Image: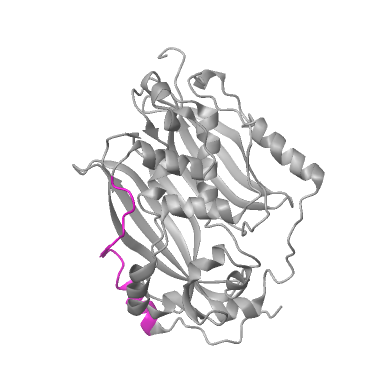
Amino acid sequence: MPDSPTNPSPFTPESLAAAKALIGVPLRRDQHNSLVSVPAVKRWARSIGDRNPLWLDSDYAATSGHGRVMAPSCWLYSVDNTCLYPNFPDCHVIYGGCDWEFYGWLGVGDGVAVQSKLIGVEEKTGRFCGPMVLQTGETLFTRPGGEPVAKAVSYVLRTPRPAAVEMGKYRDWTKHILTPEEAVTTEDGYDNEEIRGGQPRFWEDVVQDEILTPIVRGPLTSEEVIQFLGATSPSRGFKHFLRHRQRHPQAAFLDEDTGSWESWEASMLRDDVAQAFGFPFAHDSGIDRISWMGNLITNWMGDQGRLKSLSVRLILPNVYGDVSWCRGKVTGKRKQDGQNLCDLDVWCENQRGQQTALGKATLALPGKNSA
């Protein structure tokens, strides 16, 4: 593996200056959902394997204390995927993580809008491709009257494809074939998933270093990836794709096998496309793993808890065939501004024993005196 790529860097003073000139400028976004509806919430929850009846069962939700079907916090990814990456058209887009702050619940019938802007452009270097650029974006989610619902600060890496292929960080990766024992363990993980639901988890009962009941997702398949993308940020097709490619030629590549243009999003379906920008195999979007960790937390905290913040960094690819175990533990508890807060470490770990995502979260829990 070379220490640094021999391909020329696409990050010229002019391209960096053009990107930095967009800092603070409102960006146009193709918002997917603008209304919390039963079908939209149900489709998204199912796309991440979330079985909490508060999102899925209108009769249950009506008696839950919320009075209606609610949207899990990370459902906001189906409003806007928070992936902000203007300029650098010759570079690949890799979602590196997100810092979420959640200010309140959304339920069926609520409208939601977004305001997005770039807040940072920073040159980086790393083992994946040598020089790269980190674009930091901010997406504010609001109710129709302007009341903030959540804020997402996202981190997107712009990586030169030829340099990443030359560096070959993942060149030695091999696909992991699940053994029969591993397959049974995975199925047991699904069977053992615990959804706290209507049983309150009181702040007073939480103890330091308490382990959250893990959830398992995978083995990753094309069906899971397609379902998640369809619920979150459907790919362009037909004339929409044609016009987008005409405006942004580098957003697509000419497939030599078919003679037709193909989106780089095909890397989430095809090994050869993923390998053309330095990944080992077809992979997930990364956003799904962040959402799985949100699912882990809401399972554990119960319907009376509220997720206040979730910060996750994606550190390794999650490729087809991989099983992801979402885990967490309590790192602290405190009272602040009249709230009973609990802090967590959360992470995703694959069947190889590698951590593919690391995060922290804060949630508010009910107290026994206020129940």
Front residue of 322 and 259: 259
Q: Is residue 94 above or below residue 346?
A: below
- Residue 344 location (% of width, % of height): 55, 37
22 relative to 158 in the view: left or right: left
> Dividing the image into 4 quarters, which one contains the C terminus?
top left
Front residue of 86 and 228: 228
- Residue 83 location (% of width, % of height): 41, 60
Q: Which residues are magenta?
A: 14-34
Front residue of 202 and 195: 195
Q: Is residue 202 above or below residue 278?
A: above
* Residue plotted at (44% across, 32% down): 56
Q: Is residue 306 above or below residue 204?
A: below
Q: How is the image coloured?
A: one colour
Residue sitting at the far top: 369
**Viewer can see residue 360:** no
- Residue 129 location (% of width, % of height): 59, 75
Magenta stretch: includes residue 30: yes
Residue sitting at the far left: 145
> Dividing the image into 4 quarters, which one contains the N terminus?
bottom right
* Residue plotted at (28% across, 47% down): 34
Q: How many marks?
A: 0
Residue 125 placement: quadrant: bottom right
Magenta stretch: includes residue 292: no
* Residue plotted at (34% across, 72% down): 244
**Viewer can see residue 63:** yes
- Residue 339 location (% of width, % of height): 40, 26
Front residue of 42 and 210: 42
